[in-house]
């Protein structure tokens, strides 16, 4: 039994003893039937009762008025009506009360701060969402800008190709007229040298030189062919140039089989004149036979030391065309075109910018951004070395400066990109794309 229980039991015993001493005389104490069922022992008749019943119903010897003390754990008297509180319990109750007060105070603080915390959390979530939305909008804007830049680069690339094609056709037209004129001039010389022709002026008139040239000038190959047919209808001697001119007229009118026959005849008659080979290559290309066209072009360039830049450009263009139709060998064909442009830059240094621009287009088709950037730098150096810039030079610089700015921006080199975008504005202050790239 612990110490507290012993103390309480002793106090209860003292209270019972005090109550017994306060009685005025001995009496038989009968147990409260409501709480105790024990009765007194039976006595013989005539014998006075000499026992006293204690509060627990136990009997004591006669004459002994002292109540027998029972152990506390053997039925101690209930002391709830005379409650005793120790200082230790009082202290514990005070501490418990204070603890409850602190709980109440803490709960009040929680109740006060919870709405503010909830509001802050809600605000934080809103700000997070707004930040996420802003980041998404930024990403979309960057994608749109990239797409616009790529579209612009593609448009410039297509424009450069179209411009190169125009230049190529112009050169081809000039060369065709020149070759045709030379052939007709040679025919007139043949007439002058032919002793059998007595009326030379009439013969020259029948040749219809001016009519043929005028028809070719207008692109009216049907009319040119008509004049050529009239010329070939005569019984006069025909030379290699006659067949060459006739072959050109036939090719222009898309009579390819007859044209090939006439052109090959011209090559057989004059093995030192390689010009008909160019028309033969064009015919094969028009028929969709790129391999034969390439072979004839390469043979022509190998045999003719006087081949011009347009001849070489046609060969490069043929490789590019093949790359567009054969994805498996695309890279290989484009490498061949790029190699031809390298040879051209050595053979025709005065038009290096035009050559390199076409070479850059081929590298772009190969998705070789580093190669394109290297070529652009060569074009920039070529134009910057000129004492004066004409419109074409400025156009080249504007194109390559912007291309290099875009290249470095994709590499994450903002400083270099900024330098090139500023160079664009130095050439063309009104270039809106460069302004936008610089945030102006």
Image: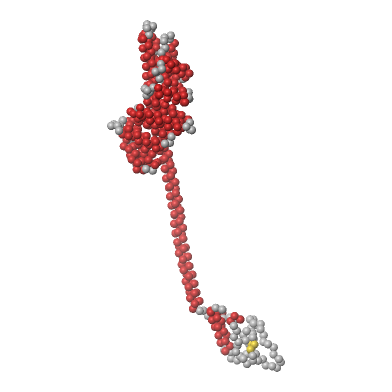
Q: Is residue 327 above or below residue 104?
A: above
Question: In the image shown, does 313 or 229 lie closer to the viewer?
Answer: 313
| Residue at image location 40% in from the left, 22% down from the top | 303
Rendering quarter of residue 410: top left
Q: Is residue 426 left or right of residue 21?
A: left
Rendering quarter of residue 150: top left
Rendering quarter of residue 168: top left
Asked if one can make out residue 246 in the rendered structure from this viewpoint, the answer is no
Instruction: Return the x and y of residue 58 as percentages of the image width and height.
Output: 64, 86
Question: In the image shown, does 201 or 111 lie closer to the viewer?
Answer: 201
Question: In the image shown, does 397 or 268 lie closer to the viewer?
Answer: 268
| Residue at image location 43% in from the left, 9% down from the top | 234
Judged from this view, the residue extending furthest toward the right is 45
Q: Quadrant of the N terminus?
A: bottom right
Asked if one can make out residue 363 in the rendered structure from this viewpoint, the answer is yes
Instruction: Return the x and y of residue 310 as percentages of the image width and height.
Output: 38, 25
Instruction: Return the x and y of residue 277 as percentages of the image width and height.
Output: 42, 21
Question: In the image shown, does 172 or 144 lie closer to the viewer?
Answer: 172
Q: Quadrant of the C terminus?
A: top left
Instruction: Return the x and y of residue 338 as percentages of the image width and height.
Output: 40, 31
Q: Is residue 96 above or below residue 27?
A: above
| Residue at image location 60% in from the left, 91% down from the top | 25
Q: Is residue 422 above or below residue 12?
A: above
């Amino acid at each position: 039994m612990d110490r507290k229980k012993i103390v309480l039991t002793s106090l209860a015993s003292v209270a019972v003893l005090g109550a017994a001493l306060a009685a005025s005389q001995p009496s038989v104490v009968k147990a409260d039937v409501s709480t105790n069922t024990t009765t007194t022992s039976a006595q013989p008749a005539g014998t006075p009762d000499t026992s006293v019943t204690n509060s627990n119903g136990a009997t004591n010897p006669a004459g002994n008025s002292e109540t027998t003390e029972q152990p506390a754990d053997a039925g101690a008297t209930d002391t709830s009506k005379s409650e005793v509180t120790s200082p230790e319990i009082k202290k514990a109750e005070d501490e418990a009360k204070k603890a409850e007060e602190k709980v109440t105070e803490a709960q009040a603080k929680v109740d006060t701060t919870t709405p503010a915390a909830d509001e802050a959390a809600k605000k934080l979530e809103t700000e997070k969402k707004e930040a996420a939305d802003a980041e998404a909008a930024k990403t979309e804007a960057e994608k749109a800008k990239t797409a616009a830049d790529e579209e612009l680069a593609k448009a410039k690339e297509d424009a450069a190709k179209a411009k190169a094609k125009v230049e190529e056709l112009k050169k081809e037209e000039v060369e065709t007229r020149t070759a045709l004129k030379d052939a007709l001039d040679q025919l007139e010389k043949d007439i002058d040298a032919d002793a059998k022709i007595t009326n030379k002026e009439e013969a020259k008139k029948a040749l219809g030189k001016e009519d043929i040239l005028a028809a070719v000038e207008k692109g009216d190959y049907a009319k040119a062919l008509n004049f050529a047919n009239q010329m070939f209808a005569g019984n006069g001697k025909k030379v290699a140039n006659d067949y060459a001119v006739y072959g050109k007229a036939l090719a222009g009118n898309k009579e390819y089989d007859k044209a090939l026959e006439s052109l090959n005849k011209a090559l057989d008659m004059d093995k030192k004149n390689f010009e008909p080979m160019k028309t033969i290559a064009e015919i094969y290309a028009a028929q969709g036979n790129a391999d034969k066209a390439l072979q004839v072009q390469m043979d022509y360039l190998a045999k003719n030391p006087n081949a011009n830049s347009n001849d070489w450009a046609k060969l490069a263009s043929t490789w590019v065309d093949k790359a567009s139709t054969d994805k498996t060998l695309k890279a290989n064909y484009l490498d061949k075109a790029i190699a031809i442009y390298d040879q051209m830059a050595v053979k025709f240094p005065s038009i290096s910018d035009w050559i390199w621009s076409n070479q850059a287009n081929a590298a772009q088709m190969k998705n070789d951004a580093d190669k394109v950037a290297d070529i652009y730098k060569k074009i920039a150096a070529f134009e910057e070395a000129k004492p004066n810039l004409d419109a074409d030079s400025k156009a080249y610089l504007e194109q390559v400066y912007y291309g290099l700015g875009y290249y470095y921006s994709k590499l994450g080199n903002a400083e270099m990109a900024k330098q090139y975008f500023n160079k664009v504005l130095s050439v063309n202050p009104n270039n809106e794309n460069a302004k936008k790239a610089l945030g102006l």
